[in-house]
Image: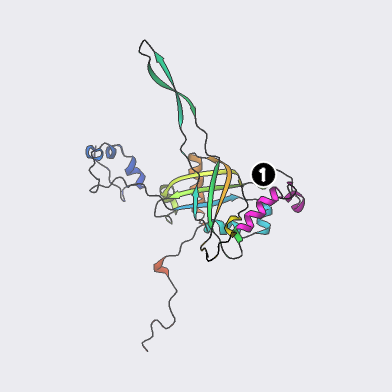
């Protein structure tokens, strides 16, 4: 069987990765870097997006730009944890030899954190504060958004849904069929709610001016991972909700840059 090299003859780089002959190469497992054929690239993370797919209407009514601002002003995501399969030992004989059988699967993560750079005027803090205090008023403990906005008190009305996508470094390469190849990981969060009103960054220590300020917002939610989620992530990337500005397109040139005077 001939080895398959990635290139124009293949529909995608993933075909080369999953070709059986490539992983059967003897020197692949002996510490010999595949710098000749280069069938496999090391996983490189560090390019990620969040996309709100559903958001409380009463929060958007007061902060119409918040969804876009929080997506583009996205500084970090954490909260993912490994899901472990628990096994139980079955023993037999005088020596109590054992083997393990599948018992249960650990729980999926139910919380995560988003980081945002804050700006003067506190647009990030104010939007999240409006969301949290609408669900529960700090003074009375009641939910205020139903009466204020004419809505029923339902989890559907005060929760959101969010897609988290990690891509390869060619993060803008999501046109056509290429989108499915650039996605390294995607998870879809449902029943999402913020869990605090961020105030601690307003504390004061003399002779200290802190900049920039990042808001670290914890959320509760239900994480979903599946092939269907990956397909939905492809669709969202193709929708072109994220734009990029490249150096070669830089138009910020002084008006007299070409002057010879």
Residue bearing the label numbered 1: 156
Magenta region includes residue 107: no
Where does the image place residue 111, in percent across and percent down from the top left?
A: 55, 43
Where is residue 101, by image quadrant?
A: top left
Q: Is residue 51 left or right of residue 58?
A: left
Q: Give the residue furthest to the front.
A: 206
Q: Looking at the picture, tell me which residue is in the foreground, 58 or 88.
A: 88
Q: Position of residue 45 (x, y in %)?
A: 40, 50
Residue 24 at x, y = what percent?
Answer: 26, 36
Horizontal side of 187 relative to 93 (left or right) equals right
Residue drawn at (69%, 51%) of the image: 133
* Residue located 25% across and 41% down the image: 3
Colour scheme = rainbow
Q: Is residue 249 above or below residue 80?
A: below
The image quarter containing residue 252 is bottom left
In depth, the one of 202 and 85 nearer the eye is 202
Q: What residue range appears in magenta?
A: 125-153
149 versus 19 height, above or below: below
Indicate the position of residue 236 as horizontal and vertical percent values.
Answer: 52, 51
* Residue that sits furthest to the bottom in the current view: 261
Residue at image position (40%, 48%) is 181
Establish if 258 lies above or below 89: below
Q: Nearer the viewer, residue 186 or 133?
A: 133
Q: Residues within 10 Å of mark 1 (few under 14, many from 20)?
A: some
Name the side, left or right, on which 231 lies relative to 5.
right
Q: On the rendered image, what quadrant is the N terminus found in? A: top left
Residue found at x 76% / y 53%: 148
If the image is split into quadrants, where does the C terminus sit? bottom left
Q: Is the residue 88 above or below the residue 42 in the image? A: above
């Amino acid at each position: 069987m001939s080895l398959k090299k990635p290139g124009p003859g293949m529909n995608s780089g993933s075909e080369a990765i999953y070709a059986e002959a490539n992983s059967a190469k003897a020197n692949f497992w002996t510490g010999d870097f595949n710098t000749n054929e280069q069938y496999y690239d090391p996983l490189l993370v560090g390019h990620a997006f969040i996309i709100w797919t559903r958001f409380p209407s009463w929060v958007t009514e007061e902060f119409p730009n918040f969804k876009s601002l929080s997506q583009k002003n996205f500084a970090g995501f954490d909260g993912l944890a490994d899901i472990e399969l628990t096994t139980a030992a079955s023993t037999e004989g005088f020596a109590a030899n054992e083997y393990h059988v599948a018992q249960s699967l650990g729980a999926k993560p139910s919380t995560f954190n988003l980081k945002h750079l804050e700006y003067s005027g506190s647009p990030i803090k104010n939007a999240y504060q409006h969301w949290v205090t609408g669900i529960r008023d700090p003074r009375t403990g009641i939910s205020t958004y139903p009466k204020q906005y004419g809505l029923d008190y339902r989890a559907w009305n005060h929760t959101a849904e969010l897609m988290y996508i990690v891509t390869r470094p060619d993060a803008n390469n999501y046109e056509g069929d290429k989108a499915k190849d650039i996605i390294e990981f995607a998870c879809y969060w449902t029943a999402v709610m913020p869990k605090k009103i961020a105030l601690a960054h307003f504390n004061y220590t003399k002779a200290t001016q802190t900049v920039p300020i990042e808001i670290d917002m914890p959320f509760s939610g239900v994480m979903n991972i599946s092939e269907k989620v990956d397909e939905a992530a492809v669709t969202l990337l193709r929708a072109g909700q994220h734009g990029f500005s490249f150096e070669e397109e830089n138009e910020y040139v002084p008006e007299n840059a070409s002057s010879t005077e």
